[in-house]
Image (tube, rainbow, N blue to C red):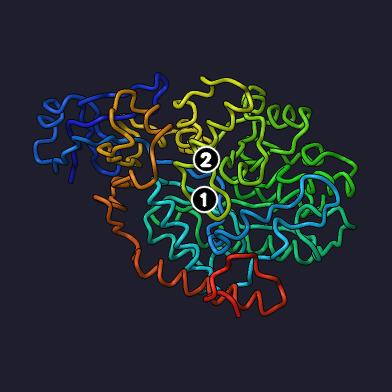
Amino acid sequence: MAAIIYDTVIVTGDDNDTVHYGASIAIEGGKIAAIGPDADLRARYPSADRIDGRGKMVMPGFANTHTHLTMTLARGVFEDLSPPHKPPFSGGLSPIPLPAMTPDERRVMAQLGALECLRSGVTFMLEDSSDIDDYAEALATSGLRFLFGERAYDRVGTSIGDPAPYQLDRSLGQKHMETIERTFAKWNGKADGRIRVAISAWAPDMCSPELLRDLSALQKTLGTWMTIHLNQVWGEVAAVQAHRNRLPTEYLADLGFLNGKVICAHCRCMDPREEKLLGDARVIVAFNAAIAARRGLSPRIESLESQGCTITMGSDNMAEDMVEVMRTGMFMERVRRADGRQPSPEQALRWASRNGYEAFGMPDGGWLAAGNKADLIVIDTQRAHLVPMLRAVSNFVHNGQARDVESVMVDGQWLMRDGKVLTMDEPAIIAAAQEVSNRAWSRQFKANFKAPAGFSPEALP
């Protein structure tokens, strides 16, 4: 049945950044049917379910273009254990590795991340991980839209950011490629088309030239997207220079790896020459602003965008709050540019919504117009921090919070309504995630890793 949200604020995210005040939006058959005056829409859809939009704001859903949902396990741990920005580099994003988890434990933590995404207004996300089939079914039932990036690498004995000699295991890379193909065959196009499968090359210092060429060939065969962590930390830059005598982006460009269906996450430890290479290839960049701020690093977004890259936004590790990501990205860029006006809130919103949808082959998503996907969120604007509501986009980007997201719709179906999640058992997921985390970290500390100060006693051995 059609639905009309009436007498509300509608942020369209269209080419003109149009905002309608006191307007109505009609949804029918998974699409936005119309936007306009309430009397007109009621006449066109007389039997539609009418939803009172007074004190609310309807916006496009967010596109989270780079995340690792199972790494919610490291929440409150890894944020303060970043690797050094100067030599010596030894590899890894933390001196304490992420605990190994069973498939069931990974499923619980992935559900927790997806739940936070949903509550912060995310309607589409790119999940980058290994063995995603462990929890794909659970994520599919959430009703969210996913691009699963199944990961490949063939370096062993260390992790990203280690300039030590490269230990190659070609058989491992081939095993990962087989997993990618199986995952693609099983999940691509499933859940009424809400799930698609991409390829993830872990990072330039974790993939040999042979594997990167093989993955590029597989990308062409499958006709899908590729994602890679690029220039994430300074140790990665040092490692690629040590192994390949090239900067990371030069290494990828030499192999013909870069193209308009490659999304490069981070790009924050980068030489201007590399930014030009990315722009020339028209790659997609995931600006993971919140984790970048936590690590004390940031990409030159103005340069990347002016060179020709499409800027999108992702949450990356531990936290999945896209409202925070969007605001942090705008603030970080204003500090970098020493400009108190640019980027604008409208531009930050576009990075966090429409650009992500369009970059991944959905030009009819991430913005609100007749005929577009009914992927949208409803904001409760009757909050002390959002009143007065004078300039809707600026107000929300500067002052909004994830808890202001009251309802979420994907393909015309409510996934959250009036603050209640409808497609996931929220209390059960939260309880299970705490139990999983206590067990997993207890196992890790039994393996002689020292717990950081202030750790919960329940998670200690």
x and y percentages locating residue 317 in the rendered image = 58, 53
x and y percentages locating residue 293 in the rendered image = 61, 41
- Quadrant, the C terminus: bottom right
Disc 1: CA contacts within 10 A as few (<14), some (14-19) or many (>=20): many
Dot label at residue 360 = 2
Q: Tell me if residue 447 comes above or below residue 394 in the rendering.
A: below
Asked whether residue 45 is in view, the answer is yes
* Dot 1: element: strand
Nearer to us in this view, 43 or 78: 78
Q: Tell me if residue 228 comes above or below residue 328 in the rendering.
A: below
Please identify the quarter of the rendering in which residue 287 is found.
Answer: top right
Mark 1: which amino acid?
Leu
Mark 2: which amino acid?
Phe
Report, in whole angstroms, how far the alpha carbon at label 2 lies from the one at label 1.
9 Å
Q: Earlier in the sequence, mark 2 or mark 1?
A: 1
Residue at position x 74%, y 57% in the image: 92
Dot label at residue 147 = 1
Please identify the quarter of the rendering in which residue 281 is found.
Answer: top right
Nearer to us in this view, 256 or 308: 308
x and y percentages locating residue 401 in the rendered image = 39, 42
Nearer to us in this view, 419 or 230: 419
Q: Tell me if residue 178 comes above or below residue 344 in the rendering.
A: below
Judge left or right: residue 158 versus residue 356: right
Judge left or right: residue 235 versus residue 332: right
x and y percentages locating residue 356 in the rendered image = 50, 38
Mark 2–mark 1 CB contact (< 8 Å): yes
Judge left or right: residue 194 versus residue 84: left
